[in-house]
Amino acid sequence: MADASPPTRMMPRDALAARLWQAASGLLDRPMALVQRLVGGNRMAWIFLAPNIFFFGLFVFLPIGINIALSVTGGTNLFLGDRPHVGAAHYEALLDCRSYLEPGSCREDHFWKGVANTLKFTLFQMVAMVGTALVTALVLNRKIRGRGFFRAVYFFPVLLSPVVVALIWKWILQRDGLLNAAITTAGGQKILFFVDPGWAMFWAVFVSVWAHMGFYTLILLAGLQAIPADLYEAAEMDGTPPMRVLTRITLPLLWPNLLVVLVLVLIRAVQTFDEVFVLTGGGPGTATVMIVQYIYETAFANQVQNFGRAAAASMLLGGLLFALTMLQLWFARRKAA
Amino acid sequence: MSSLSLRAIRKSFGPVDVLKGIDLDVADGEFVVFVGPSGCGKSTLLRVIAGLEAATSGTVAIDGLDVTGQRAAERGLAMVFQSYALYPHMSVYRNIAFALENMRLTRAEIETRVSRAAAMLRLTDYLDRKPGALSGGQRQRVAIGRAVVRDPKIFLFDEPLSNLDAELRVATRKELASLHAEIGGTMIYVTHDQVEAMTLADRIVVLNQGRIEQVGTPLELYNRPINRFVAGFIGSPRMNFIEAVAEGAGRVRLSGGNGILDLHDVCPDTARPGIGALSVGIRPEHLVPVDSETPDLWLTVDLIEKLGSESYIYGTLGDGTPLTLRAAPDDPAERHQRIGIRIDRQRVHVFDEAGRALGR
Amino acid sequence: MTVSLFRQTRHPGRIGWTDILSYAYLALGVVLMFGPVLWLVLSSLKTPAALLEFPPSLLPLTQKTVTVPGHAQPLELYRVRMPDGTVRELAQVRRIGIQAQMLDPADPATIIRVPIEAREPIREMAFAWSNYTEPLQQFAFGRYFSNSLIVTIVATIITLIINSMAAYALAIYEFRGKALMLLLVIGTLMIPITIVLVPVFLVITQMGLNNSLWAVILPGAATPTGVFLLRQYMLTLPRDLIEAARMDKASEWQIYARIVLPLTLPALAVLAIFSIMWRWNEFLWPLAVLTKSEVYTLQIGLNAFQGELQTQWHYLLAMTVMTLAPVALVFVFLQRFITTGIANTGMK
């Protein structure tokens, strides 16, 4: 938190939420005092931790174990007791390819199509996202009239739900939509954006950049504003040309933030699902199916619910995310150091 | 090495006038110190000279050439910032070399200049370090090195010693003085510390509320301040001011004093008609405790500071006016004691109601 | 030359090409970021007929009609350029090939034949508010809305309470296993719902919570982000405060509830906004776990609606606007707070 000054603001006495909280927490005063007498003051830490740990255990750590169990058992039944052990069959099926460069040559061609699409998407999105966020942050870092307004303009889509974002653009990009109207007015031919695989991928990337770039812009802008103004003045006194200020001072000093943003974008891009799913439905054909969509459909949307296959696929995705998160933590630590 | 002249410099930030018309000439090779209380506009003036801030009106000329429209980068000046503003991601060598690289000097030339500057500032052993791994004093020297190496027309210093501890400040002050003696460049130095100003300057410019109060050598300012502000600002501890009324030519009656003071030698024209209330300024070092039945002033002692080499006595006159005086280290005065004081009549300053010094 | 290209203009009154470029970029940004949302809102107010128009009109316009005695249906009004060069407003009775039979509403008896290229429709602004009202009655849209509201509020309250308790434990106490607990919390950062979709579904099914709102509320209630955010803030509180409270014989629970929590309010507010945003917009998990339409949240309802009623854009657009509106309102009021909160924490 940047707001590290000792907080002096007290909860407003008359706020309804504050009163409710006082009443509710007051009910626990006696029971908790009793508990404290039983376990001792310092061990109260575990009492405070308990609810959160319970939720983490039930919905994060236990599921990891279940996931492993699911991924080595077969059948369509959900409960583990009713599932026959199949060993590494799901993993073998997922990884069975004549050539990893051709999704069509794989037994689970949908999965590999998802992997290929996700990689393509991630690559394009990373370049576009970091590029636009960086340029926007640099522009907003100048002495701009109405900076707060412009920052808000770029930021607000971050708060919109993926479904809303996808529908907004679906409406614009549809056959008789605004963009095709503009194209025909300019003398061009209507383009069926969601019928052409190339265009569908382009718009999937575009829409996700549109929706999320404001967030990364904000992080980079905060990084830029943390660079002391007198360094720029020193550079000016040193007679530094603008381009050199960018390459020799601004970017090197922003680099730690840039790295964090890069990895963050990467981690999020690998898990892309909602906007693209609502926008293109994975189509045309399987041109924009992502890994997560494969997992979701294999487990929940297909006629035959193959929980084991989905669990195995998510284990593979999990391994990838683990590696990427380690990378991020490493960068974050280097930034802090 | 260059001269500088400022003409009618004004600067406003919105409705706030920070500089209200500054005229000043700085000669080639001169060490000029801008001094004044915080908020007097001295740093802004320096930044206007540097080109980091554009003046609202007025002209800045270097070597007779109008540079008002030029940006900082084009003016060929060097500045040492209060925070040093070292590039944290570059080694000491790169920090010093950065401006030279901008000037597109050859690598060999850069190497020579940097090592010469580093040797002069005792930085040779630290050239590979990052600023973060240096002490405050070393960083300070890197900042100076960055300025020196460019051989600038004018050196600008913005309170360069304020981030150092007291001991280091004195040492660096001496180094700066010898640096000026050695390379002899034109230097403009901003500080709020009048001791720095007195020790470093060829000439001091006293600024107050966006205006120049007085320009002069340190001793001129000490001996002949032209107004109450300068008199109070220069000298430590501060000058004492005592209200007074004129009693004929060269004669004043001090409020809280005993009888009439004859100041004919220093200030004969107190009898000018309509002169009104006066104030008399006397520095602590020009007051002497005396064992006399008829001293100039009776002082009740409130506090005595014994510094070893000398003592300062703080007290109040009969009418409540506070007074400070310098005494011998073994002065026998005690708290609550009433002591007699003699005024060195040759060193008294008299100011009229508007605070202007009355001439000698 | 100017450093200001990447920093700022200090010299007032000078506008360089870099300034022009910057403002041009920002103006383009405004169009690109605001334009689509504005277009959505404008479109959502159009009648189905106006939505089918190509190229579309910018504003919601419909053809002006007039009721003429002797004609059961209202007739469409046109501006017609007559052969003698005058322009008259006529109502169209019917169109036959390239000819239109028209009449003057003031003189309904006389039929005037006009070539169709000589007439031009008269249009007026008309907001189709029915796009908004009908989905609320015909479809369970109101239900979705209240489901989303319940999920968001309940989940946020649970998140705030249990995360602040955990943060308090990890900020204030020194105990054996603290490092391990911190590590566990960090560990959960690496396991998003995308990885444990199927097993969490199994757990929820086992708990018998399928197709209840609890299925959406519970799994995301404990967040590593929240614990860290609050812990960081609590670490800045003066320790003396807690020591003093202990000297006053306050119980540990009272210290948490009465002293630490009120002082953590700024951080709690940031977490509350995050949580509201996460829950209101959540998609993948509800999509997997909610299969009955009466428990759909807005996002799932909207998605289902776009699948089913591909052609009913007028309803879909209006519902999209309604889904977006609460977020937009929150943003307008808390914009500065949200952006600084996110910039400070680097989290979303």
Image: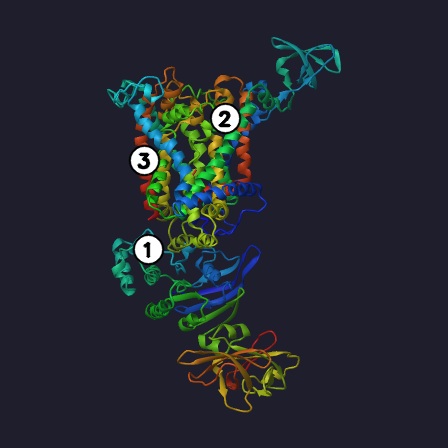
Residue at mark 1: chain: B
Question: How many angstroms separate mark 1 from mark 3 (CA)?
Answer: 30 Å
SS state under label 2: loop
Is residue C278 shown left or right of residue B90?
right
Give percent across and percent down for residue B48. Answer: 47, 59
Is residue B182 shown left or right of residue C239?
left
Q: Residue furthest bottom?
A: B293
Is residue B100 shown left or right of residue C147?
left
Question: Which label lies toward us, 2 or 1?
Answer: 2
Residue at mark 2: chain: C
Nearest the eye: A22 or C22: A22
Question: How many angstroms separate mark 2 from mark 1 (CA)?
Answer: 53 Å
Residue beneath disc 2: C297
SS state under label 1: helix
Give the label on residue B132, or none: 1
Give the label on residue A324, or none: 3
Give the label on residue C260, or none: none
Is residue A67 placed above or below C89 in the rendered structure? below
Q: Are marks 2 and 1 on the same chain?
A: no
Question: How many angstroms separate mark 3 from mark 2 (CA)?
Answer: 32 Å
Task: Classify 10 Å Cα crowding around label 2: few (below 14), some (14-19), many (20 and above).
Answer: many
Nearest the eye: A62 or B267: A62
Q: Are marks 3 and 2 on the same chain?
A: no
Q: Are marks 1 and 3 on the same chain?
A: no
Badge 2 amino acid: Thr
Residue at mark 3: chain: A
Task: Classify 10 Å Cα crowding around label 3: few (below 14), some (14-19), many (20 and above).
Answer: some
Give percent across and percent down for residue B350. Answer: 56, 80
Question: Which label lies toward us, 1 or 3?
Answer: 3
Badge 3 amino acid: Leu
**Residue A66 visible to the viewer:** yes
